[in-house]
Structure formats: C-alpha cells, structure tokens
Amino acid sequence: MKKISVIVPMYYEEEVAKECYLRLRNVLEKIENYDYEIIFINDGSKDKTLEILKNIAEENKNVKIISFSRNFGHQCAVTAGLRYVTGDAIVIIDADLQDPPELIPEMIKLWEEGNEVIYGKRKSREGESRFKLLTASMFYKTLNALSDVEIPKDTGDFRLVDRKVVEVINSLPEHNKFLRGLFSWVGFKQKAYEYERKERYAGKTKYPLKKMLKLAQDGIFSFSIKPLKIVGAMGILSVIISIILFVYAVLSYAFDWNNLVPGWTSLMVTMTFIGGMILISLWMIGEYIGRIYDETKRRPEYIIDETINIEEK
Ligand code: UDP
Ligand code: MG
C-alpha cells in the first residue's frame, strides 16, 4: 500500500500540538488506500511540546518524532523531516493549523493526476498583521526581481511533493536551505493549489522579525548573484558621477564660479557616496563569503537528540 508522510515542525507549540495531531489523524485515517505517517520535529522547544508528542507517539505508532538538541530553525526542521520520510507522497505543513490539514485529500488527488509538486498558494491570509503582509509582498517582489528561478508568490512551505522530488532535495549538499525556492528550482511537474490561509489556532508566531530576515536573506543570497552585479553597476554609476563633479570643479576653478571653500562640495559628495558604496559592497560580498564559510565547515545542519518510532538510518 502506498503511504502519505506528513512533516510538522514544532517550536514551542504546546498549545497546538494535540489539536494539530487530532486534525491530521482525522484527515489521514479517512483517506482510503493509503497508509500514513506523521513526523513531528521538535525544534528545541523547552516547553511541553515534546512531552505531548511523546504521549501521542506512544498510542499511535504512525507518529514519529525527531527531537533536536536545540533550536535550529524551521527550515532545518523540515530538512530533517525530509530525510526520514518513508512515504510516496510527502506533505509539509505548519503546526499552527494555518494551513488546513483538510486540504490534504485534494492535494493527493492532484498528485494522483501526475503532478509532482503541489504547492499551497495563499488566496487570502487571515489574522496576519499589515506589517507581515507588506514585508512578505516586498520580499517576494525583490526575490523574483533578483532570482533566476521563478519563486511563486504567496507560497509558504505548505505543499505535497512526490518521493522522487524529496530524494533530489535530500541529495543537495547545501546549507541554509530556502526550501520553497529549492522546490521550485528542482523543476518537475509543478501545480499551484489555492487556499485560504487561516488564523493561527493558538499561541503566537514563532517567526519574529529576526527569523524572517534570516529567511529572506537565505532566499535572496542563495538564489541569486545579482546583488553582486548591482554593486558593480552602482560602482560604475559612482565613477560617472565623480567624473561629472570633477569637470564641474575644474570649470568653477578656471572661471571662478563660486566663492565656496574650493573643493568642499565635491569632496564631501564623492567621499560620502563612495564610502557608502564600499560599505554596501563589503556587506554583500560578506554575505557570500559567509555562505562559502558555512559550506566549507561541513557542519551538520541539525543535531538530533532522540528519535521515537523511527528506525535508525
Ligand atoms: N518553527 C520551527 N522552528 C522555528 C520557528 C518556527 O520549527 O525556529 C515552526 C513553527 O512551530 C510552525 C512553523 O515553523 O510549525 C511556522 O511558524 P509560525 O507559524 O510561527 O510562522 P508564521 O506562520 O507566523 O509565519
Ligand atoms: Mg503560522
């Protein structure tokens, strides 16, 4: 019998863990002709999340747990889940029930029709702050302007993917994965699935601004080298501007156009401008060097503390 695997990352989700499991089980047990497994990843929560999950895993052997030694972040949690899935179709879903599990059967239908990546596309987003909506929209616009791969807008990590796509993702050695970008980058038969994104079931967002910025940076810098090219363009522009200033300075000296302290304006302008350019370039180059550094260290992306109901690989 074919099997559906569901991956659920959890970080301080004690308020939603149980409900999340119940809703998922309800849906998965009703799907005919498929076995299922649910893999919960405890991403270093120090609250009751793990305890609740352990109780669930005890009574239901289809529930598996991967527990990290500390918080490694949402993307690493999903990455770990992907390595351990044993199903033929894999669903990635948030724990907070913003992405309704009840949509899984329809996604499975699309998969049976031959689609290999069915990604959830948000038609609407309930209960999210204006700030989040605005920054998210700015992010996707920037990302698509910069990146060589089309990364669908309004798309999170909620998706159903075929086993073979997961194998490809698992074979990628890179760190700091921006999964939704990679799932688009790998190609295969992609299909958007539109849905209404609900409000969080309980608890607060586990994506504070700092984590969102990290995700945005991973998205931009691991999918595009255009920032480097933009720096080049800015460099040329600054040279052109300084040439114009130079001509102006020489002419005003020759024809005595103004009585300013000679050279002050042009010096200030060029100095600040070029200084700014250099700093921006250094920052951008630093981003890439940081990534190269990360890759060369060859550190694992996560460390598992314990697993339950999972055979060692
Ligand atoms: N999450 C995680 N590790 C983190 C942050 C978040 O595993 O460091 C999980 C979280 O438990 C949830 C999912 O990632 O299942 C999405 O997080 P959240 O719903 O807080 O993000 P939002 O929907 O507000 O963007
Ligand atoms: Mg959420």
Image (cartoon, rainbow, N blue to C red):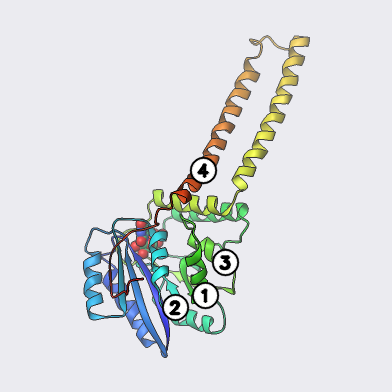
Residue at mark 3 to residue at mark 1: CA–CA distance: 11 Å
Residue occupying image coordinates x 31% and y 74%: 310
Name the image quarter holding the N terminus.
bottom left
Disc 4 or disc 3, which is closer to the eye? 4
Q: Is residue 26 visible in this depiction of the protein?
A: yes
Instruction: Name the secondary structure under disc 3.
Output: loop
As drawn, 204 above or below 83:
above
Question: What amino acid type is highlighted by mark number 2?
Answer: Leu
Q: Between disc 3 and disc 2, whose residue precedes?
A: 2
Q: Which mark is residue 217?
A: none
The vertical placement of 249 against 302, above or below, is above
Q: Report how far apart the C-alphas of labels 2 and 4 lie in the structure.
A: 41 Å
Which residue in the structure is indicated by mark 3? 186
Front label number (2 vs 1): 1
Asked whether disc 3 touches disc 1, contact meaning CB atoms under 8 Å apart, the reply is: no
Q: Which of 77 and 158 is in front in this view?
A: 77
Which residue is disc 2 drawn over?
A: 103
Q: In this orientation, which residue lies closer to the viewer: 288 or 250?
A: 288
Between the residue at mark 2 and the residue at mark 1, the CA separation in whole angstroms equals: 22 Å
Q: Do the residues labelled 2 and 4 touch (CB within 8 Å)?
A: no
Helix, strand or loop at disc 2?
helix
Mark 4 lies on residue: 289
Give the mark, 3 or 1, whose residue is nearer the N terminus.
1
